[in-house]
Amino acid sequence: MGAFAFAGGPLEPERYRESLADPSAGGYASFEGWVRDHNEGRTVQRLEYEAFEPLGIAEGERIVAEAVARFGVTRAACVHRVGSLGIGELAVWVGVSAAHRGEAFAACRYIIDEVKHRVPIWKKEHYADGNSGWVNCERCAAAPRSGGPEDDHAHSHGPEHGHARTDDSARSTAPAPDYSRQIALPEVGAAGQARLAAASVLVVGAGGLGVPVLQYLAAAGIGRIGIVDGDVVEGSNLHRQPLYGTADLGRPKAAVAAERLRALNRDVRIETHAVRATPDNIDALVAGHDLIVECTDNFRAKFLVNDAALRAQKPAVFASVHQYEGQLQIYRPLPHWPCLRCLWPEAPRDGLVGNCAEAGVLGPVPATLGALQAMQALKRLLGLDAGESPSLVTVDLLSLETRRLAARRNPACDHENPGNAHHSDEQPLELEFETLAEAFESGLELVDIREAWERAHDPPGLQIPSHLPLSELVQGYAEFPAEGRYLIICAHGVRSLSLAEQLRSQGQAEVYSLRGGLAALRS
Ligand SMILES: [Zn+2]
């Protein structure tokens, strides 16, 4: 057994104690944390611990080594239970053998305190009323890090682990957050504040929308915030993402945002994921959070989050901006509630609609929509949205007009298997040819969607009579023919794939993209 371990079954204190025996030790002190039948005035029937084990073991071993070094004890060990536990079961065991009892007690105390604050363990309580929730101990989170004896019940704080370790130094000096102005609202009060402190929110995208979302959620005292963003800070971001500064250029947004948010509120626990959301990681990212706020500028990520929220049955708040307009939509896991796909079964694909990078935007536009997203998230977590019906809200920041359109569940949208109803994968989207002549022989009509200047600069080896520049299609000056069988061609096969995907999603079955574009052909 290592100095720190997780156990999936009942703990065996007798066996662990033997591992501490040493002829030079005069005694042994131990702490056992048990599962209580109540927390915060609610009756608890059982609970579950979930740990991020590789990181947890590394951090736990570090804590035990610190205790041995600091107090000069002989041996020390700690075992934490994970999985489902009943009332009265042993959740955590700490043992220390030492020459003298004073050091043994002190080291034991040090280990249990540090494990609670630093090892990434989540606790989910199941209550007598049938509800359940991931919880932190509000009293301990709000109190200074003294940890009196009344603190010694079996629970864990949120994951103040790894990257959150810098919190501890900040926490000891930074003043406690003052929530008096929001607690003063009768709809919030101390109970609402406790709900926020117990909540965890995943924010996908730390850009123009994500910055105000992160700032307001951290300031409001959300207990745990996960940030997903794989980008670094660029100079062109700053006008709409003023959480960052010129000194941050080139640094990962997730890391910089975490620093600023910790300085804003010492009690918020920040987890950073400096990656892009992908089909491989999105479900793991969504798991362990109560609510998702989607703040990217691309449809691929929005649908990824939508589908993961549906699978996990978690609420999600979406927004998007285009020039001076913004849209806001919330998904709630209720049978009649529409998802993003219900409203956008034929959503534009990436590369077809300008995002901020290409279309241009004034900073307050995403800031307004981000603030609305933060408000929707707080309303959901506080239960203030009970009377709200599904809707799509549009805001025009030029005319200052706001519209609220009722949104309905689309019966063709399969919420059991999100996303599946909209893929017609029977036919390949891309076709590969060696030469243009071979492509002509396929019987498909070839359509060049490159811009006129591209055609002039780089004419194809054989004449392609059909020319429909993508810019004209996107702006509505030209329309792609609805009937026929087409091979869409561009320079590298990226734009043609986007267009083919969009046409397929609109029901046009016989459109294909030339894989790799003209660049991939032998001349
Ligand atoms: Zn749907």
Image: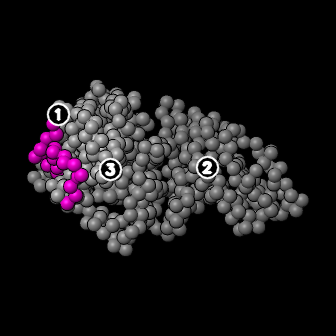
275 in magenta = no
List x then y, in percent, for residue 224: 46, 52
Name which residue lies at 10% across and 52% down: 399
Name which residue lies at 49% across and 39% down: 133
The residue that label 3 is drawn on is 521
Q: Which amino acid lies under the numbered mark 1 shown in the image of this protein?
A: Ala
Q: What is the C-alpha distance between the residues marked 2 and 1?
A: 54 Å
Is residue 175 toward the left or the right of residue 122 in the image?
left
Q: Which residues are magenta?
A: 457-482
Is disc 2 in contact with disc 3, using a CB cutoff of under 8 Å? Answer: no
List x then y, in percent, for residue 42: 51, 38
List x then y, in percent, for residue 511: 26, 36
The residue that label 1 is drawn on is 482
The residue that label 2 is drawn on is 53
Name which residue lies at 76% across and 45% down: 13
Q: Is residue 123 visible?
A: yes
465 in magenta = yes
Q: What is the C-alpha distance between the residues marked 1 and 3?
A: 27 Å
